[in-house]
Image: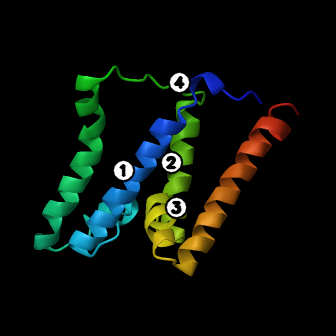
Amino acid sequence: MILDTLHFTPGMSLLGGVLIGTASALFILANGRIAGISGILGGLLRTTADDVMWRLAFILGLIMAAPLLAIFVAPVVPTIEASPTTLVIAGLLVGVGTRYGGGCTSGHGICGLSRLSPRSLIATLSFMGSGMAIVFAMRHLLIHA
């Protein structure tokens, strides 16, 4: 494995983490709700009328952030080294895991850990460990087999 130190941006990464943490803290302080994406999106399917607007605004903000940023800075074009079939299967597995684990990475990893939730610690260790094991298997065991 080769580390891409040319594109490593610790300052921007730290700034992004601080912004996400600050936004999550402000969200729970202002609304009393966790900024977990799966819960917010899933809540749109079973929500009350007074609960719809903030959920739609949150999701719209996620969708519009990249196009709005592209107005000010050159967009980064990602390279995806996976087939569309692999991406669909991966997305479905993430969705199933999110439902099974009672939340997503943002809900457990950012919001749950900051509240010292034991359940979120177990969930975060589980999905981080699983992700590392899959990457290791894919890059070192299956590709070269």
The residue located at (23%, 47%) in the rendering is 61
Q: Is residue 3 above or below residue 121?
A: above
Tell me how far mark 1 sits from mark 3, CA to CA: 28 Å
Quadrant where the C terminus sits is: top right
Q: Which numbered tag is attached to residue 91?
A: 2
For the residues bearing labels 2 and 1, Cβ distance under 8 angstroms: no
Q: Earlier in the sequence, mark 1 or mark 3?
A: 1
Task: Say the numbered circle drawn on residue 125.
Answer: none
Q: Nearer the viewer, mark 2 or mark 4?
A: 4
- Compared across the picture, whether 135 is left or right of 145 comes to left
Q: Is residue 137 left or right of residue 125?
A: right
Instruction: Please report whichever mark, 2 or 4, sits nearer to the chain's N-terminal start.
Output: 4
Q: Are marks 1 and 3 in contact (CB under 8 Å)?
A: no
Disc 4: CA contacts within 10 A as few (<14), some (14-19) or many (>=20): few
Q: Which amino acid lies under the numbered mark 4 shown in the image of this protein?
A: Thr
The residue under the point 51% across, 63% down is 109
- Mark 1 neighbour density, 10 Å: few (under 14) some (14–19) many (20 or more): few
Q: CA distance from mark 2 to mark 4?
A: 17 Å
